[in-house]
Amino acid sequence: MQGTIQVYRAESEIPAAFQQLPSELGIPLVSSGNVWRGKSRFRGDYTSEIHGDTHGKVVQSLAMDDGTVFRLSGGPDVEIGTLYVCDVGTPEAVKIENHIESQFYDRLDSLWSTGGLVYIDLLQRPGAKIAATSRTLQAGISLLVPFDDGTDAQLELEGTRYYPFGYSIWASTAGHMTIRGESRTFSREVDGRVLPTRIVTVGSVGAGEGYTEVVILDLKPLEADSPIAKPITVASFQDLGVAYQVYRHRLGDAEVEIAERYDTLPGAGGAGSGGVFGGFRTAFLWINGLVILTAAGYVAIRFAKKR
């Protein structure tokens, strides 16, 4: 599948978000972007909006392909971004995979992965509804908080004929802290597939504290000319309009290796143009284990490992 994703969030409970759009309620946009998901490849590009005393935007891209994960960070106020290329199994790769899970997969799979497989068959029956306590939750459904001897949790789920996890209510109490929440996933049929369109979550954390999150999705089947139609490489991210330096995390090697620099593609809206290195005059010099990269006024000195 592929499409767009927008995330709105307010640090207060706004139950009206189940009936109205976030723009109508003044809920701030915190991130927006595009996502492409195939059988063996994934890429998600998004821009985070920074609200509060410091305003700004941060460009991020997360990707996975054949045992390698990628994370690019940059922005309009950053002279050069950073692309991390990590072998699966490295600590940095685990962090990126967890980020992909929370930022994209949990939302793309919201109709199916709210809980365990134990309840799917039951919830797909028309009008089915189940209520679970901490004991049955441990057996089949994971909640937002870990279970221990001091935690009491309850969860109510309601499914439909087409998918099991369209609606849920949860509550968890640990000591004097009580967390309650309600989540509903709206959907539509696209080319014979039921896909999520809007995920609304309203929760409370203790007395007078809460949050509202609305995720707007516009999804469709993956197109043949998508950015993940070909293998993902370090050059794949030039279309983001961000010049970037590449760092590699290899399995079994504690040392981070600096690699090449990439400029933006022509017409990508970045600071430069002309493909790889954007036509910069580039020189690599090895001096006692140091690599020095000079390119049109940009100078970077990093410790690097000789090949």
Image (spheres, rainbow, N blue to C red):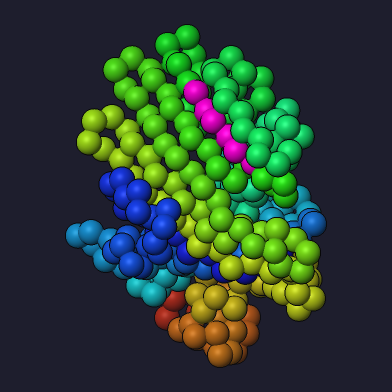
The quarter of the rendered structure image containing the N terminus is bottom right
Say which of 298 and 161 sits in front.
161
Magenta stretch containing residue 171, yes or no? no
Say which of 212 and 101 sits in front.
212
Q: Residue placed at 76% from the left, 78% from the top?
A: 225
Magenta stretch containing residue 155, yes or no? yes
Residue 107 in view in this figure = yes
Q: Residue placed at 47% from the left, 27% from the top?
A: 145
Question: Residue lying furthest top in this view?
Answer: 149
- Quadrant of residue 285 within the rendered picture: bottom right
The answer to whether residue 202 is above or below residue 220 is: above
Magenta part of the protein: which range? 154-159
Query: Is 241 situated left or right of 159 in this image?
Result: left
The secondary structure that most of the magenta stretch takes on is strand
Query: Is 31 situated left or right of 140 in this image?
Result: left
Residue 304 in view in this figure = no
The answer to whether residue 288 is above or below residue 282 is: above
The answer to whether residue 59 is above or below residue 100 is: below
Q: Which x, y percent locates residue 165?
A: 62, 42
Question: Residue lying furthest front in this view?
Answer: 127
Q: Which x, y percent locates residue 234?
A: 66, 67
Q: Residue placed at 24% from the left, 30% from the top?
A: 207
